Amino acid sequence: MKMPLLKTFLLLLCLLPLNSEARDEKQDKAFEKKVIKVLRAQVLKEAAWALVQEPETVTAAVAERSAGGRHDFYSEGDYWWPDPENQDGPYLQRDGMTNPDNFVAHREAMIRFSRIVGALASAYKITGDATYAKHAFRHLSAWFVDPETLMNPSLNFAQAIKGRVTGRGIGIIDTIHLMEVAQGVLVMENAPGVDQVIVDAIRNWFREYTIWLTTHPYGHEEMNWKNNHATCWAMQVASFARLTGDRQLLSFCRSRYKDILLPNQMATDGSFPLELARTKTYGYSLFNLDAMTMLVYLLSDSSYNLWEYTTPDGKSIQKGIAFLYPYVAQKSKWPFARDVMYWEHWPVAQPFLLFGAKELNHKAMFKTWKNLEHAPREAEIIRNLPIRNPLIWL
């Protein structure tokens, strides 16, 4: 069967080689203005909400099943359920099916925190009003500085499973929502009235957390996972290393992308076979492409252009975007099984669309991003969409 003409055109457009000349500042500013035009009203509305929110950290909710202390983040494995034949026994797995009775208060608090800081940083970037930054640093101080309310810079008790484990390496994926927090600090750290002692303390928290991520057995386990978890480990580490100025760690993440993640996770057609093997083929494919695109975006600069990097057998981030973009533009054409949950909620304004459009100069992709939902309210979609404030990354 011949591929429809429009789909062929879009696919070929995605695969066009990048202009070898560096994008100049004028082009970047023009693109940023386009994004501001799309998001301005939403950003200011969200920031108005954020300005009246009080800080709430992990210390606000007690996790009775946690083996940790008051300052330790705790969550439970999403797809684990009570044994119907032994309610007090170890939980059993049901892949793709989220248990609504799991403890999620800490995860919700972190997502709320990310939402607040992302909104305030975006509004500060648009307006230059230091009021937004000052309020953001109240929340930042509560999470990372205040000894009464701070979160410990480790994740020893994330995605626990009743009767089986008190924590797991794959729980590290829960802190993808700290990425926009870290980026928000970079955007607002020099705002008038911001205490640089607090900024330094926040940087030190992230420095300690990256040490834990790169030395603890859970960190090694997550780094070496085979699917989106490994991508998200590298994405987080790269984001936090940018805040702490750790060039050695950034270099490690570049090597990880080129030597491990891209060659081992992507097929030669641009798909992610390990994500397609799950019960949420569409959602997980979107999630991994978003994460890999953000990793490339974070690690590319004038010296390293990972947008142009291609493995010897032809795998590249461009090919990954080319594979999935047509199914975002026309979801009904998805040739694989529908997701067992949340199928109707995808896609939204996926980050790979915007950053791919920017780097590939792809106008149709930008239009697709512009027309999709920018403020999803479904909790599961938000949980799998760590980049919800793209302005702070531009």
Image (cartoon, rainbow, N blue to C red):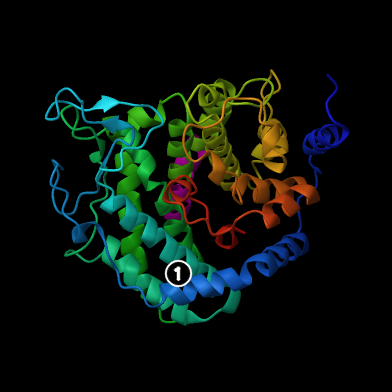
The answer to which of 379 and 310 lies nearer the viewer is 379
Amino acid found under the numbered disc labelled 1: Glu
Principal SS element in the magenta part? helix
Residue 197 visible in the picture: no
Q: Is residue 179 left or right of residue 309?
A: left
Mark count? 1
The answer to which of 180 and 364 lies nearer the viewer is 364
Q: What's the residue at 76%, 50% (across, down)? A: 22
Q: What's the residue at 66%, 31% (across, down)? A: 334
Reply above or below: 297 against 340.
Answer: below
What are the residue bounds of the magenta stretch? 239-252
- Give the position of the C terminus as an image quadrant: bottom right
Name the spot of residue 300 as percent of width and height, x first: 62, 44
Query: Which of the 4 image quarters holds residue 95?
Result: top left
Reply above or below: 146 against 167.
Answer: below
Name the spot of residue 295 as percent of width and height, x first: 55, 41
Q: Which residue is mark 1?
A: 189
> For numbered disc 1, what is the local secondary structure?
loop
Crowding near pointer 1: few (<14 within 10 Å), some, many (20+)?
many
Q: What's the residue at 52%, 55% (across, down)? A: 376
- Give the position of the N terminus as an image quadrant: top right
Q: Is residue 16 left or right of residue 374?
A: right
Reply above or below: 211 against 46.
Answer: above
Q: Is residue 75 left or right of residue 355?
A: left
Residue 119 visible in the picture: yes
- Magenta-span inclusion, residue 259: no
